[in-house]
Image (cartoon, rainbow, N blue to C red):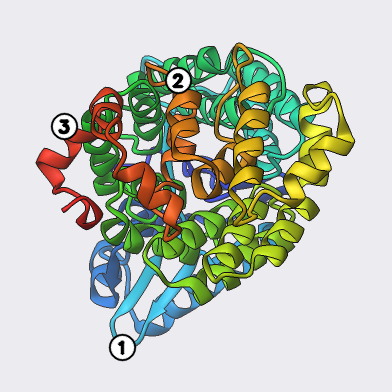
Amino acid sequence: MDISNHNFSLGALCVDPVSGRLISASGMVKIEPLVMNVLTFLAARHGKIVLRDEFLTHIWKDFEASDESLTRAISVLRKVLRRLDPETVYIETVSKRGYRLAASVVQLRPVETQEDGQPLSADANEDAFKKAIELVLQGRSLNERPFHADVLEIAASLLSEAISLDPQNADAHSELAHTYSLMSTYVREGDKAALIRNAAQCAERAMAISPGLGFPLTLIALEQFTFGNILDAIAMTEEAYRRDPQNAEIALRLGYFFAAIGLTQRAMPYVEKAVSLAPIQGRNLQILATVKLANGDLEEADIMAKRACDMQHHFACETFAASAFAMGKYELAGQRLLQGSRYLTEFLGDKFDDPAVWEKIVADAYSPVQSTREALGKWIKKLLFVPGTFPSIPLAQAIVRSGPASAFFEIMGNAPPPGTHGTLLCIWGQTQNCVEIRTHPEFMLFAERMGMTAAWEKYGYPDRLN
């Protein structure tokens, strides 16, 4: 990727190589050309080790080069990056070899030029472009707090404004696509399927501007996965991962897709990498816990799920309950699910018309008593047959692990509804009910409808089905 004359995002920052500026949500710093050259050289090879000799050959080719010059430039660069974003380590030192840029890099757009090839510097265009960058950074920051629907709506508004100011800002289109994908899960009302399609459309616009982008490709893949084209979804996400292996979101989605169709061992390294790249994202920890749960690593799953809950990722309450249930701690499992359900009551509002019944059902969700499980199935069925509602909230996942197997197929219906993949991830767990679902006569027909069997023919069938 030649980005020496292109604006690009670097983690939570935006870099303008021509003007020498680094911009964050908190401010802007201008760096000297030599230091910027070091940064762009690293960015063009992000995720790879850049040897010290490579720096000296390519950047100091017309000047006297020394190890001390490179060390100084890296030190200056690290100080600037730490000032703008103190929470992120951008540059890693590889002992006795060189350096590696750890943050994700996304090319935004070529620098606009006049007919003579000089950068376009009209104040109005410059101000609009700078404002668009700031709006993108603000939107990205808000997207990191997905449990507040109003916050996501503000993010969508900011990113739409950024696009109106700078229609060729691929990062703005990509981030807006991400916002819509989050809204499809976390916003209470609205057409969830339409939000996923909106995300894919925004992602397509981003890739039309910058065809080499990786992350938008995963959002197009999400649409494919949601509506049953799992084989193409995984292939797209593998290509996105090839383009940008240091992007935590891409790694997570690839692992998630594999885990959702039962290939949980194959999923593990991708989900673990996502956690290593973004360890403070509760969602990443929840997915890792769910995959570990499916692989039978119950104690580790319990630890990861608790960490996700501690980070206020409330949807992890079901995974935290499931780990206790898988260890035979039924009462504790019910308590955990009930504790996490406080948020869901607020999230789903009047869909729970009788809070007293709701609390009892949730408290008993993981009961080994068959009559309670049947009651749970009826209650969930009542709640989830609502137009536009995804059957992927923790209660639906609870029935996967503890409700009657027949209720699973009743809830999923005869076609793959949006959000089913959120529940698919849970059916590969270790509880007896998960086994009953996988061995149910309807399961293979369901798997074929969902597009799972086509993916299995390419990537291999889960051991649990052999």
Helix, strand or loop for disc 3: helix
Task: Give whichever of discs 2 and 3 has the lower sequence position.
Answer: 2
Residue at (28% x, 61% y) in the render: 265
Q: Position of residue 345 (x, y in %)?
A: 81, 36
The quadrant in which residue 409 appears is top left
Three-letter residue code for mark 2? Pro
Q: Is residue 461 left or right of residue 253?
A: left
Q: Is residue 1 left or right of residue 307?
A: left
Q: Is residue 35 left or right of residue 156?
A: left
> Disc 2, disc 1: CB below 8 Å?
no
Task: Give whichever of discs 1 and 3 has the lower sequence position.
Answer: 1
The total of numbered circles placed on residues is: 3
The quadrant in which residue 271 appears is bottom left
Between 436 and 50, the residue placed more toward the observer is: 436
Label number found at residue 417: 2
Three-letter residue code for mark 3? Ala
Three-letter residue code for mark 1? Lys
Task: Give whichever of discs 2 and 1 has the lower sequence position.
Answer: 1
Q: Which residue is mark 3?
A: 454
Q: Position of residue 208 (x, y in %)?
A: 34, 18
Query: What's the distance in space between the residues labelled 1 and 3, CA to CA?
Result: 47 Å
Helix, strand or loop for disc 1: loop
Between 132 and 216, the residue placed more toward the observer is: 216
Q: Which residue is mark 1?
A: 96
